[in-house]
Amino acid sequence: MPLKLPDKLPAIELLKQENIFVMDTTRATGQDIRPLRIAILNLMPLKITTETDLVRLLSNTPLQVEISFMKIKSHTPKNTPIEHMKAFYTDFEQMRHEKYDGMIITGAPVEQMPFEEVSYWDEITEIFDWARTHVTSTLYICWAAQAGLYHFYGVPKYPLPQKMFGIFPHRALQPLHPIFRGFDDVFFVPHSRHTEVRREDILRVPALTLLAESEESGVYLVMARGGREFFVTGHSEYSPLTLDGEYRRDLGKGLPIEMPRNYYVDNDPQKGVRVSWRAHANLLFSNWLNYFVYQETPYNVNEIV
């Protein structure tokens, strides 16, 4: 079954060029099944890029998925046309009485600030709390993962001496857990961050389960509430050229940036990117949808508690 997306969302045409079958709202309403309702709170600066990355991964199962994009009132994005936000995004206030099978909360370019100094901290923590009673399973990515771990469990973040930037090998600590179905013993994940959470802080909290980590990039995947919350510190959703764009952007600004590790062929940007994380990313999102959203959600979405 395909994805049900808002009419005229730019991701539809971009993904059709990749032979990914997506369907706009007008056509999807003709199918007599209840789609999984997924809310996406997109805090990344390049909204259309992130929408396309996430939609690409959510399209990889036989489930029909209906996606709604949420926005916060206390922040106006600088890098996305206001017309796009008005056409495709809905304020949290208008969505708060709805229930959703799943939710994804993305990273945000605020990780070097103390959490409480982020201008939208009060609004986003209200959304975190709301998700616990209105969503079957929530996937927190990168900064959102750090923010959720801090808000709910008091886990601090720490500044890194240099940016964690590149593609790093990881291993599952519970390889038979359903979120890892189909994973190899070693799998690769993009990271792009200046801060980290530490395993000893995770292990101190009985309500948290550390599921995957990397010797180089540290904590990767943490679960809480039996899979109703997943905290992912990396960017499995990144498309092949995202790190390249970040690297060239920072070089152009004269910022101190090292080449992303384990990313370019022969460590040579002129030779292009070696993609090593795409299969794992597809598995992560399809396992989350299959085992923690689809199998756990009630038939009537309004019965979520």
Image (cartoon, rainbow, N blue to C red):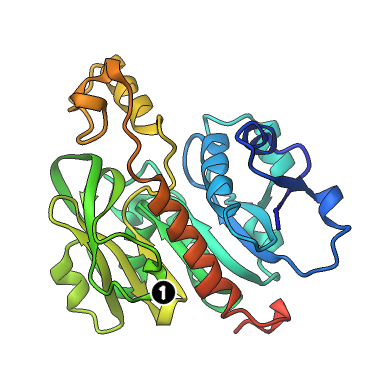
Quadrant hosting residue 151: bottom left
* The N terminus - image quarter: bottom right
x and y percentages locating residue 105 in the rendered image: 48, 56
Left or right of 233, for residue 298: right
Residue lying at 29% horizontally and 77% vertically, measured from the top left: 208
Q: Nearer the viewer, residue 199 or 59?
A: 59
Residue tagged by mark 1?
Answer: 178
Residue lying at 80% horizontally and 50% vertically, measured from the top left: 25
x and y percentages locating residue 286 in the rendered image: 51, 61
Residue lying at 34% horizontally and 57% vertically, measured from the top left: 116
Residue 76 visible here: no
Q: Nearer the viewer, residue 234 or 280?
A: 280
Name the amino acid, label 1: Pro
x and y percentages locating residue 274 in the rendered image: 31, 32
Left or right of 234, for residue 202: left
Q: In the displayed structure, would residue 159 be above or below residue 100?
A: above
x and y percentages locating residue 122 in the rendered image: 46, 60
Q: Residue furthest right?
A: 30
Residue 128 visible here: yes
